[in-house]
């Protein structure tokens, strides 16, 4: 079974799925950082609450994507 840190070169579809998940992960991290910057700027009634809700949603989605990446790596065929 592939390890979490095992490179996936040559493993076909699993590599494609992981690459897409990693790209989505990177985009969400960028959104989270942007939200953190906005939250650090100070309280704005209504807007801060909306940003906090979105931040929590992004955090949950990041955890889900990380779990999906691990699952794809577990499903990848073993190298022989």
Image (cartoon, rainbow, N blue to C red):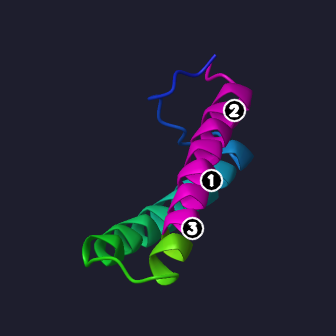
Q: Give the range drawn in magenta.
A: 52-80
Q: Report if the CB atoms under discs 1 and 3 are less than 8 Å apart.
A: no
Q: Which of 16 and 52 is in front in this view?
A: 52
- Which image quarter holds the N terminus? top right
Quarter of the image for residue 80 reads top right
Picture layout, residue 73 above or below residue 14? above
Picture layout, residue 63 above or below residue 28? above
Q: Position of residue 46 (x, y in %)?
A: 52, 81
Q: Which residue lies furthest to the left in this view?
A: 41
In the rendered structure, the answer to whether residue 15 lies left or right of residue 35 reads: right
For label 2, the SS is helix
Between tags 1 and 2, which lies in front? 1
**CA gap, disc 1 and disc 3:** 10 Å
Q: What residue sits right under mark 2 in the picture?
A: 71
- Can the viewer see residue 34 in this picture? yes
Q: Position of residue 8 (x, y in %)?
A: 54, 38
- Can the viewer see residue 10 in this picture? no
For label 3, the SS is helix
For label 1, the SS is helix
Q: What residue sits right under mark 3 in the picture?
A: 54
Q: Which mark is residue 41?
A: none
Q: Is residue 34 magenta?
A: no
Secondary structure character of the magenta stretch overall: helix
**CA gap, disc 3 and disc 2:** 25 Å
- Label 3: few (<14), some or many (≥20) within 10 Å? some
In the rendered structure, the answer to whether residue 26 lies left or right of residue 50 reads: left
Give the residue displayed 68% in from the left and 52% down from the top. 17
Q: Residue furthest front?
A: 45
Q: What residue sits right under mark 1 in the picture?
A: 61
Q: Report if the CB atoms under discs 1 and 2 are less than 8 Å apart.
A: no
Tell me which label, 1 or 3, sits earlier in the chain. Answer: 3
Q: Does the magenta stretch include residue 54?
A: yes
């Amino acid at each position: 079974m592939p390890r979490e840190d095992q490179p996936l070169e040559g493993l076909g579809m699993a590599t494609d799925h992981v690459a897409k998940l990693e790209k989505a992960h990177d985009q969400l991290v960028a959104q989270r950082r942007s939200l953190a910057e906005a939250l650090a700027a100070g309280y704005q009634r209504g807007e801060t609450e909306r940003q906090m809700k979105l931040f929590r949603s992004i955090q949950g989605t990041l955890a889900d994507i990380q779990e999906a990446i691990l699952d794809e790596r577990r499903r990848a065929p073993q190298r022989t």
